[in-house]
Amino acid sequence: MTEAVSRPTLEAVAARAGVSRATVSRVVNGGDGVREPLVERVRRAVEELGYVPNQAARSLVTRRHDAVAVVIAEPETRVFADPFFALQLRGISKELTAHDSQLVLLLTEGPEDYARVGRYLAGGHVDGALAFSLHLDDPLPGLIRGAGVPTVFGGRPGWGDGPRGDGPTVYVDSDNRGGARDAVRHLVGLGRTRVAHITGPLDQTSAVDRLDGFRDVMVDADPRLIVEGDFTPAGGERAMRVLLDRCPEVDAVFAANDLSAAGALRVLRERGRRVPEDVAVVGFDDMLPVAEGADPPLTTVRQDIEEMGRLMARLLLRGLDRRGRDEDADPGTGKGLGGAPSSVVLPTTLIRRASA
Amino acid sequence: MTEAVSRPTLEAVAARAGVSRATVSRVVNGGDGVREPLVERVRRAVEELGYVPNQAARSLVTRRHDAVAVVIAEPETRVFADPFFALQLRGISKELTAHDSQLVLLLTEGPEDYARVGRYLAGGHVDGALAFSLHLDDPLPGLIRGAGVPTVFGGRPGWGDGPRGDGPTVYVDSDNRGGARDAVRHLVGLGRTRVAHITGPLDQTSAVDRLDGFRDVMVDADPRLIVEGDFTPAGGERAMRVLLDRCPEVDAVFAANDLSAAGALRVLRERGRRVPEDVAVVGFDDMLPVAEGADPPLTTVRQDIEEMGRLMARLLLRGLDRRGRDEDADPGTGKGLGGAPSSVVLPTTLIRRASA
DNA sequence: CTGAAAGCGCTAACAA
DNA sequence: TTGTTAGCGCTTTCAG
């Protein structure tokens, strides 16, 4: 491992350039209102000394951190088994990077970690937070709101809009319901009449919304055709077995995600049903390795996960900007004008492959 | 989004407890050398006011940040397609959390991002860095070392030990070569004589090491039995086809990871070969959803990825501690005694399932 | 054992 | 336009 080195300070740069600290500071922060020759001199001094501003000192006075926390509550190992999370992170990272903000990752293993997260968020280390609200009854969202940090959620949270007086909950989500409708309509359009649904865990809004979409189209669906899964391949297998036992004449399945569709596919093969001839299958997510790798390749509803991440970050940063400006104009409330960011629901697309 | 609130300071706590700032500071930082009744008074004041130390102010004077950067260079989307990365992160996160250190995630999309990472690292925002050295010719590792930040690498880097004068490169890796040997010996023990190898991308040390392990056992391996893959299912399919065409009598395959083994399995099924009767298959990683979900379930070499992450963090933090103490004892060099952390290679285990 | 005082490196009024 | 001057909130000698 390498040595620590003592870094040059503003003072040092000022001395070298023969100007005051204030001038160096101005140049470093954009250089407005400093005459060209001086700017040049300072730039050179910065260069020669390899000066990098001390972020701690800067934050101390500006109260900005140029950092955003990303909170991922993952009691189960599940999210780690699919790339959802990585893609989302990537989108977030790209957007933050573009705005010179850092990404502080807060992973939780369970409720025992929540206090730590709360403390960190409340501690004013970051300008804002991005959080994935996974379960309906998760205490985390409340905790985050309690910390008083501007936050954007990934996925529609399970509670209604802002019970607090501090503005509505902002979130980014896919059009789960609409996507589900498209999937089921596609199946119906194929002439299928006994269309089943393998749901996700119904304590997550995404799963509930997809089920609602299914019901929108299959208004009088036989309740035996709806089986609860859990977004895992094993859950998909289990559900498919139940379905086949209960209702052998099923001719189509809409699975709430690709992973459970893959499980269903496996059981169908095992039971000698041909896909899509005997049973057509549609998934949700368009998780490439899973959907394309399935046998047969999966027809599925694509959501642009990376874009969701990017959007979450963008919304948060925009809100921070707005807040900063508002405080100048209206120190009383910090609330504003018309530009407050609001939630966004991204469209989905049906991707046709061989399975339906 | 919520409001910013002005947080109580040390000063406020001191006033409330009727002591000096210094005393509060002592209590907050462990409370050594403060008499019990005062400790109690201060604790209560902290509690009542909901005081949380301002990390920026603290860093400014201590020059510690209690934060570690995790650098993931991911030009291709690949790593995002398997859970490797998430597991590693989880291990890292656990260990850092236990030491009250924060995780700053630095994702790069390509060489154009390297400068930014270098700047950040050199900027002294973090106490150390953890980096994944993915490719042999990656400029990133050099850049990181150049930044003068204590670093631990994940996976053996592609260059020899520390060309620099600042101590050896510290890394954590799995015993790729030994694990590969076990896999191949297992196949040979099954009586297989035409054992093939689907490699990973040979610009990564993990892939090279596994190939070396294969060769250790199959000393006179027919070169036609070695085909380069790329750690993806598609690469595995491609390689398997080549193998079957070149050498139809192949009776065993050691794939360099589970994902490519899964691809191979698919091609074998497609070509009507039974697994394991006609062709036995062994993977590497024991990526659960892939290995257990494969048809048939995959015999594979397990590496404990989460533990690797944990260990990387532990090594780094230990090094930081040591450095801290050495500097007191020996301000000249910052180098030390005997306790310098050195690299660790973790053992692997063969997991037997149905495929071999 | 406790308090007073001196900064850490930077920005942001305010003066010049 | 530039420089001077106060701090931001905290830790850490150094006295008491």
Image (tube, coloured by chain):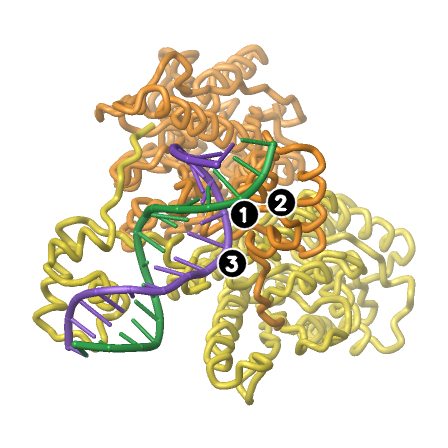
Chain colours: A orange, B yellow, C purple, D green
Q: Residues within 10 Å of mark 2 (few under 14, many from 20)?
A: many
Q: Is any atom of residue B41 visible in this view?
A: yes
The correct choice, above or below, for A339 with respect to B351 in the image is above
**Amino acid beneath label 2:** Ala
Q: Position of residue A96 (x, y in %)?
A: 54, 37
Quick one: B130 or B116, which is closer to the camera? Answer: B116
- Work out whether mark 3 precedes mark 2 in sequence or the reverse, and give the earlier one: 2
Q: Residues within 10 Å of mark 3 (few under 14, many from 20)?
A: many
Q: Residues within 10 Å of mark 1 (few under 14, many from 20)?
A: some
Question: What distance separates the C-alpha of mark 1 from that of mark 3?
Answer: 25 Å
Q: Residue at x 58, y 82 (%)?
A: B332
Numbered circle sitting on residue A21: 1
Q: Are marks 3 and 2 on the same chain?
A: yes
Q: Position of residue A350 (x, y in %)?
A: 59, 19
Q: Position of residue A62 (x, y in %)?
A: 42, 40
Q: Chain of mark 3?
A: B
Q: Residue at x 52, y 23 (%)?
A: A252
The residue that disc 2 covers is B81
Q: Nearer the viewer, mark 1 or mark 3?
A: 1
**Amino acid beneath label 1:** Arg
Q: Are marks 1 and 3 on the same chain?
A: no
Quick one: B131 or A180, which is closer to the camera? Answer: B131
